[in-house]
Image (tube, rainbow, N blue to C red):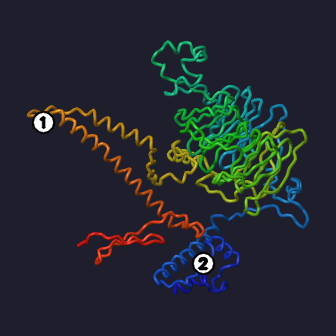
Amino acid sequence: MGVKAANVGRINTIPVAEQGVSDEEELKVKKYLRGEAADLGVLQDKKLKGQLAVREALYGKSAQAAAKAEKWLMPSEGGYLEAEGIEKTWRIKQEAIAGEVDILSTRKQFDIVLPELGPYTLDFTLSGRYMVAAGRKGHLALVDMKNMDLVKEFQVRETVRDVVFLHDQKLLAAAQKKYVYMYNENGTEMHCLKFTAIDSPFRNSDDNFEGSENFQRRFPLFGQNSDLNHILFQEHGAATKLQFLHKHFLLTSINKLGQLHFQDITTGQMIGNFRTGFGRSDVMQVNPFNNVVTVGHSGGTVSMWKPTSAAPLVKMLCHKGPVTALAFHSNGHLMATAGMERKIKLWDLRKFEVLQTLPGHATTMDFSQKGLLATATGSFVQILGDLSGSHEYSRYMGHSIAKGYQIRKMSFRPYEDVLAIGHSMGWSSILIPGSGEPNFDTWVANPFETRKQRNEKEVRSLLDKLPPETIMLDPTKIGSVKPTRRKEKLSKQEREAEQEAAVEGAKNIPLKKKTKGRSKPSKVVKKKQEAVAKAKKPFLEQQTEDKEMSKKKRKRIGEENPLPKSLQRFARKVCAIEIHPYLGLVQIVGGLWKKLLKRKDLS
């Protein structure tokens, strides 16, 4: 019975009217099916046919369950702009969009003009409810985007290059003129990350330890105390870019000297401090799939780092000129880079190959949750979309702010169709239909969480904190069994050197002196010769095995790849020897000649 149903399809073939299932639900079920059903009529094995029939039925049931769960767990559906006739989506202005959306969506479209404190950089929390804006001239503002309220704003009275939220909106980090500072939601300074004391074996490799003149000048009493001479002080320095790894609680920064720092904010320990070796950089992003930090350099190179390795995991030459912007897709397998040669490239990080090259220049880029790519240069923003799902990006939307405004950073707001733009005259918010994820998971990010829920989430995230060693290019390898490595074959010189060392060791073995003529010189020489032969024996056996293996390999290759008929006459002819049991003759048959040899009777 199951076999017959499986031959027709994975879903029961009762009419739709009798099932009470609409056409829309049927389409949802087909979306979750794993391709076409298997044709089991051609199989002869009844046991295999029954097993496959049961599996096909399970696939159908799971698809129906997923379609039913989608109705309740994902009630909202995302959409995009659709043009009519010869109309183009990139010609639709924000004013036209504002006239068609609801009142709550029109509130998300605004401009904040602060000409004396810009340019501004922005960052959102994981839930998208809170935003922090930092002006170059020291203005910091924390905004509740849900209620459109200003939570706190304060002035730090010095240059601010970048700002980033930490695990939630209660803590944020700002890269200021000399050091990295941490503030709470009330604007109170919590930490100044000047120096971090660690025990480091890398002495005589940096400028910041006790042997250098620079360090002695800054800390004159340090060299007088011998108990402190094993301690190395490290600092973030004048950071140009900040990133935060939420799953590992690591604050990452890169400074003017091209030094990359990883600091654990729960313990204060500096996990890694590496010199990139590519000079100053202000382009840095984190891959959301594996939490690998990626840095773009002035030579067109993109390097990928993890906190437990002093060397980059990957170095890619992406552009002929300096890398100006970098962004990652939410799935972690697609990377977009922009260079000074006015090219934007999309990379497949599974094969490290270019998927698409687009003309254009970008000083900042960002991917939305649904895969839209926003690029900006000067005062113009362009949105690229992959509406067909084939990783072929094309123009989707465009927006121009007031002429003369220079865009510094853009960021899509999570779970909303909103793009925030920080520029030289303040910051703006525009509507990008189809950019945000329409359904949020409260276990991952909850925009409506209460104070109690936030406290519980903070404790749970601290308990689930991952160690830095789990950061790698392919995180799916975690928990798998490491394959055994094949022994590398030694070269001829290495084998000879090992054999000579073994022979010398056998010659130098001291022999006990025995009485009654058993320690004669002739017997001593004989024992040494036996020891040398015993030491050579494993090497000779290995050499014989290698020769036999090479012969078998050559023979197998010859059988697999026989010579063509035109070259077979040049092949070496092997003679076959046959012994006749009765005549006592040895027959030698080889190629075109035969010869009989008389020998003694074998009997």
Q: Please give the name of the residue rendered at 37% of the width and 50% of the height, measured from the top-left corner.
A: 542
- What's the mark number on residue 531? none
Q: Position of residue 305 (x, y in %)?
A: 60, 41
Give, as a three-letter code, the residue at label 2. Ala
Q: Nearer the viewer, residue 135 or 316?
A: 316
Toward the viewer: 242 or 95? 242
- Sequence-earlier tag: 2 or 1: 2
> Is 381 on the left-hand or right-hand side of 15?
right
Left or right placement of residue 548 versus residue 203 in this view: left
Q: Residue at x 73, y 26 (%)?
A: 158
SS type, badge 2:
loop
- Residue depth check, mark 2 versus mark 1: number of the one nearer the observer: 1
Marks 2 and 1, Cα distance to the nearest angstrom? 85 Å
Is residue 220 depicted above or below 309 in this figure? Answer: above
Q: Nearer the viewer, residue 194 or 151?
A: 194
**How many residues crowd around disc 2 within 10 Å: few (fewer than 14), some, or many (20 or more)?**
some
Position in image of residue 171 (x %, y %):
63, 38
Q: Residue at x 31, y 47 (%)?
A: 537
Please tell me whether residue 436 is drawn above or below residue 51 in the rendered image.
above
Taking the image as drawn, is residue 147 in sight?
no
- Residue farthest front in this picture: 598
| Left or right of 494, for residue 319 | right
Which residue lies under the disc numbered 1?
518
Q: Quadrant of the C terminus?
A: bottom left
Residue 582: which quarter of the image? bottom left
Checking the image for residue 37, the label placed there is 2
* Residue type at numbered disc 1: Arg
